[in-house]
Amino acid sequence: MPKGFAPDTTSPTPEIATVEALSADQLKVNTIELENFRLKLPIGFFFNGRRLQQFSLKPLTGEIELFIRRKMKARLDLHVKFAQLFSQTVETIGDCSVPELARELSCSPEQLFQRMWFADALSILLNMRLAKQEGEKIFLSGQCPQCQRMTKDDEYTYHDLSQLEVNVPQRLSAPAIAYTLDCPFNILEQGEDDEAHMARCFHLRPLKLFEAQKLFSTGDASPGLTSLLLMYQLVCHLPGIAEYADLKGGIMNDDLYVRMGERDRRQLIHLSEKLLQWGPNLRISMECDNLMCGYKWEQAIPWGSLETFLLGLDSPA
């Protein structure tokens, strides 16, 4: 098995994607305000030649609220929490009920959500918050990078979650992007003329929900190392080479990396970073309330405490 940042064997196995990858040169991403992209997935489920993006939520009943208050505090991995939560709250995806779609994909509803794209999971989370009464109001606090003053919203000043921007890839027939190498190379140490092992193109796909926590918990890893590990994870297919026909991801390794040209290495990392930007931008503009400063910066949305975020417990009232 290739070395690299590969998924654990115990991780949920993603659905088998097709190799109908869109060329990186043809990729177009639209930026849409969340208010105009409610109840839609930026990437979606690809099923029977269709891209399912529309979804619906169940009403926030007392039973679901109790589930959030009790279950979202548990010490569980992020993808397990999300899968439990969405299994209780998402009603339909496309024109299928969640149980129907899960059966068609030969998995349970929780497995269905564990396998979903990280960008789609964040979009469902935001829509759950917006579905709450006055859920668009979010109260933030942050330290000004310029003057170090703490700025904090109150009951009269707040930020609007519905104004967050969502990056939505267009014209996808499969969740894969093809990058053609400038400098094709042989994946073997010997056999320069062996066409059966000549790498000419890589396919990449978005980050899965179950991979996100592992990738972003790399401790004190530098941004450069994180970007490299991200690329290793998202490269999912080497067309035409049987040994690397794994569409689940994690096929990139050090041996392949050192054989690539400098521009191809740089472009693959850049494309991986662009794929990570698909979905909602979880930062919102904040302005220092020091009249002598007035500095503006991008403040992260505090969604990590799921109970607080989903039930609007961040309100100062």
Image (cartoon, rainbow, N blue to C red):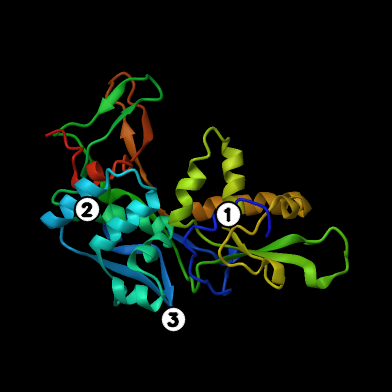
**Amino acid at circle 1:** Gln
Label 1 close to label 2 by CB (< 8 Å): no
Residue designated by label 1? 233
Q: Position of residue 227 (x, y in %)?
A: 58, 45
**Amino acid at circle 3:** Asn
**In this picture, residue 209 sits left or right of residue 187:** left
**In this picture, residue 279 sits left or right of residue 61:** right
Q: In the drawing, what numbered circle is on residue 48?
A: 3
Q: Position of residue 55 (x, y in %)?
A: 29, 67
Q: Marks 1 and 2, how far apart in space?
A: 32 Å
Of the image marks 3 and 2, the number of the one nearer the N terminus: 3
Residue ID at (78%, 68%): 197
Q: Nearer the viewer, residue 62 or 176?
A: 62
Residue designated by label 2? 130
Q: Marks 3 and 2, how far apart in space?
A: 31 Å
| Extreme-bottom residue of the structure | 48
Q: Quadrant of the C terminus?
A: top left
Which element is circle 1 on? helix
